[in-house]
Image: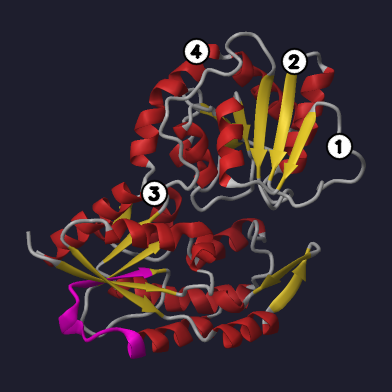
């Protein structure tokens, strides 16, 4: 097999692991370990001090949370494209370039894009509901300008790798990208445990519902807490809710009875939580992939999530969990009880865990991408 020379273009943060929830660093490492691949790192990021100032300049306070619009503007994308042009090796040195996001268009080298969301999709969300869940700081003008930049980038790409079918449909319907260019490869997980999952709760002991989300409100934490309290008040038996992610208790008042709050947690702590959980629940308004659902399933834990965005790619209603259609506390409480009583589902999810670990892995993602890129080159 001939050596495949791949450029890896990314707007890296100063601490690389924190870039896009570990995604680029995990994928980069997977490509490094693939036989027959010569990998070239192309860092298109502005100098750290400049990037920091740009983020400040684009800062907004949304629902009490500081956010920046800088990275979503068309002018920032053009800056990254200029950096890419300066830092990319000569086209003759590379067989292809993989871009993390819509960075630009190389003159000669075939390029591919990897993403979980697009501005065309954001534009559709604005038209349909007047808002973009989790991205309320983006104005229609910002979205329209960046969407136009993306469309040029996408149409000139040799292929587009996406994390979910939701974005794949939007690329075809909203951006007019030919279907043969679009490849759903999903993503890999960060919290991994290769041992066979335990069988928590099947012996009739305390059953545990797990919620993980640093941004408690955006991830549906208040809904989970209300549904759990309703479940407990209805006499559902010995059940607890474990909450991890927020630095401090995120709602007014004391921590309710039956709730165990862990705050920020290490991967080792989260791994232990998954192994003890009977159910994972996170009804967030939107997910580009929903990595935490894949992590739960890979450790044998059924899930409840919203029936939107990327989540139906991972949760199969009635098989490995349940999909929530609305923000009803009563409905979620009923699904929680149903899931906790469904021992057959939890046994089935445990049996599927090894397959989930194999599929939701970065080496698998990298291998699938390489197969597409080699095929296009051929």
Residue toward you, 12 or 114: 12
Q: Is residue 312 left or right of residue 66?
A: left
Residue assigned mark 4 = 344
Q: Position of residue 272 (x, y in %)?
A: 58, 33
Q: Can you identify the residue that label 1 sits on? A: 255
Q: Residue at x 41, y 48 (%)?
A: 188
C-alpha distance separating marks 2 and 3: 36 Å
- For residue 85, say whether it is visible: yes
Q: Earlier in the sequence, mark 2 or mark 1?
A: 2
Residue 51 in the magenta stretch? The answer is no
Q: Secondary structure under badge 2?
A: loop
Q: Is residue 128 above or below residue 358?
A: below
| Marks 2,1: beta carbons within 8 A | no
- Residue at numbered disc 3: 186
**Image quadrant occupied by the C terminus:** bottom left
Q: Which residues are magenta?
A: 85-99
């Amino acid at each position: 097999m001939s050596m495949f020379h791949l450029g890896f273009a990314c707007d890296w943060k100063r601490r690389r692991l924190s870039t896009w929830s570990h995604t680029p660093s995990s994928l980069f490492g997977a490509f490094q370990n693939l036989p027959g691949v010569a990998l070239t790192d192309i860092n298109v990021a502005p100098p750290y001090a400049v990037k920091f100032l740009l983020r400040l300049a684009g800062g907004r306070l949304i629902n009490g949370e500081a956010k920046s619009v800088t990275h979503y503007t068309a002018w920032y994308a053009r800056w990254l494209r200029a950096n890419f042009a300066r830092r990319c090796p000569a086209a003759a040195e590379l067989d292809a370039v993989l871009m993390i996001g819509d960075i630009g268009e190389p003159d000669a080298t075939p390029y591919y894009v990897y993403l979980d969301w697009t501005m065309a999709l954001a534009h559709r969300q604005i038209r349909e509901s007047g808002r973009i869940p989790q991205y309320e700081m983006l104005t229609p003008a910002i979205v329209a300008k960046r969407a136009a930049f993306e469309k040029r980038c996408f149409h000139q790409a040799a292929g587009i790798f996406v994390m979910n079918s939701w974005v794949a449909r939007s690329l075809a319907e909203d951006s007019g990208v030919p279907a043969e260019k679009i490849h759903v490869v999903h993503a890999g997980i960060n919290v991994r445990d290769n041992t066979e999952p335990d069988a928590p709760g099947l012996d009739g002991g305390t059953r545990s519902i797990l919620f993980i989300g640093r941004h408690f409100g955006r991830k549906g934490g208040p809904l989970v807490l209300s549904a759990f309290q309703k479940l407990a008040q209805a006499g559902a038996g010995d059940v607890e809710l474990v909450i991890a992610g927020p630095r401090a208790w995120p709602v007014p008042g004391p921590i309710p009875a039956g709730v165990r709050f862990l705050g920020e947690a290490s991967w080792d702590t989260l791994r232990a939580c998954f192994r003890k959980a009977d159910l994972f629940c996170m009804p967030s308004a939107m997910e580009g992939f929903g990595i935490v659902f894949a992590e739960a399933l890979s450790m044998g834990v059924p899930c409840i999530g919203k029936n939107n965005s990327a989540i139906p790619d991972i949760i199969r209603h009635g098989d490995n969990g349940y999909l929530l259609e609305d923000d009803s506390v009563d409905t979620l409480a009923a699904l929680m009880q149903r899931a906790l009583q469904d021992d057959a589902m939890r046994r089935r999810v445990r049996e599927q865990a090894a397959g989930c670990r194999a599929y939701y892995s970065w080496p698998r993602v990298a291998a699938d991408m390489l197969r597409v890129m080699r095929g296009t080159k051929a």
